[in-house]
Amino acid sequence: MTNDETNPDFAEIGRKLFAQPCEFIWATAKIGELPPMGPAEIAFAGRSNVGKSSLLNALTGRKALARISHTPGRTQQLNFFALGPDPNAPLLRLVDMPGYGYAAVSKEKVAGWTKLMQDFLRGRASLARVFVLIDGRHGVKDIDGDMLKRLDQAALSYQVVLTKRDEVKKGLIEKTVADVQAILRGHPAAHPDVIFLSSHEGEGLADLRATVARLLFERDRTIFAPTQIG
Ligand code: GDP
């Protein structure tokens, strides 16, 4: 494996990146109260129960990191986490977006949340990519399709991550990915690669970490200088 400036080993860098300290720094439901832009951000979106909290915990190796996003009052907020040795100057921020598709939520709440999300997605120059989580057992449902359309409109880089891989029969993994990729061909802003992972079993987590490492490197080549995460 190589790890020089022209041909970095993103799997290894991704592993080191996500082994960094990670802490909750900010939560808000108001677009005027976001943390000041600075470090690159990646956001995680998905319908409730897709496995978003489990993924944030598994990615960062912290069992209860995303429990905070599940506490009453926080589920409809944007929750920010700082990743890196210095939480005041992190290498990356992770943004946990409110889960959508709760049948029990009132129309006003859905409208409020949709507006928050749209304003955030449209106005956030530091947002490097949105990872849209979709339940691998079910594929792209209408509510997921709505989210993909919104992201197309926001002209943001986004990528689909399929969850709960361990619940899908081995023989169906490839077909599931191909079906999702076929749908994504109709979504111009979607990244063509689909990651299929399991937060419970760990498969695919390294792919996502490497993808994020590559993304950061493409934005700022100095980010992985040895002093940062070496
Ligand atoms: P959230 O509402 O999107 O934050 O979803 P959670 O992370 O709370 O997970 C919802 C449910 O899916 C829980 O019962 C989890 O145990 C389950 N879950 C999450 N990730 C996985 C996974 O990788 N495999 C399996 N089998 N279940 C998972």
Image: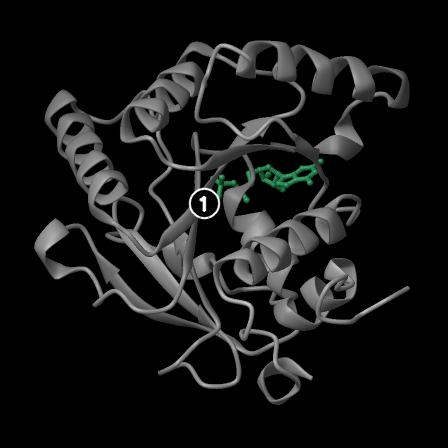
The residue indicated by pointer 1 is 129
* Observer-nearest of 23 and 214: 214
Q: Amino acid at mark 1?
A: Arg
Q: Residue at x 82, y 15 (%)?
A: 172
Q: Position of residue 150 (x, y in %)?
A: 31, 24
Which quadrant would the N terminus be assigned to in this image? bottom right
The colour mode here is one colour
Left/right of residue 207 with respect to residue 81 in the rendered view:
right
Which quadrant would the C terminus be assigned to in this image? bottom right
Compared with residue 30, is residue 130 higher up or lower down, i.e. above or below?
Answer: above
Ligand 1: give its quadrant: top right
* Observer-nearest of 193 and 174: 193
Q: Secondary structure at mark 1?
A: strand
* Observer-nearest of 163 and 167: 163
Q: Residue at x 63, y 55 (%)?
A: 214
Q: Position of residue 20 (x, y in %)?
A: 60, 77
Left/right of residue 163 with respect to residue 48 in the rendered view:
right
For label 1, the crowd category at 10 Å Cα-Cα, with few meaning under 14, some 14 to 19 and many 20 or more, is many
Q: Position of residue 189 (x, y in %)?
A: 44, 26
Q: Can you name the residue that lies furthest to the front here?
A: 6
Q: How many numbered marks appear? A: 1
Q: Residue at x 17, y 24 (%)?
A: 106
Which quadrant holds residue 99?
Answer: top left
Beta carbon at label 1 within 8 Å of ligand 1 = no
Which quadrant holds residue 188?
Answer: top left
Q: Position of residue 65 (x, y in %)?
A: 50, 64
Left/right of residue 114 with respect to residue 40 in the rendered view:
left
Compared with residue 161, is residue 13 higher up or lower down, i.e. above or below?
Answer: below
Which quadrant holds residue 224?
Answer: bottom right
Q: Can you name the residue that lies furthest to the bottom here?
A: 227
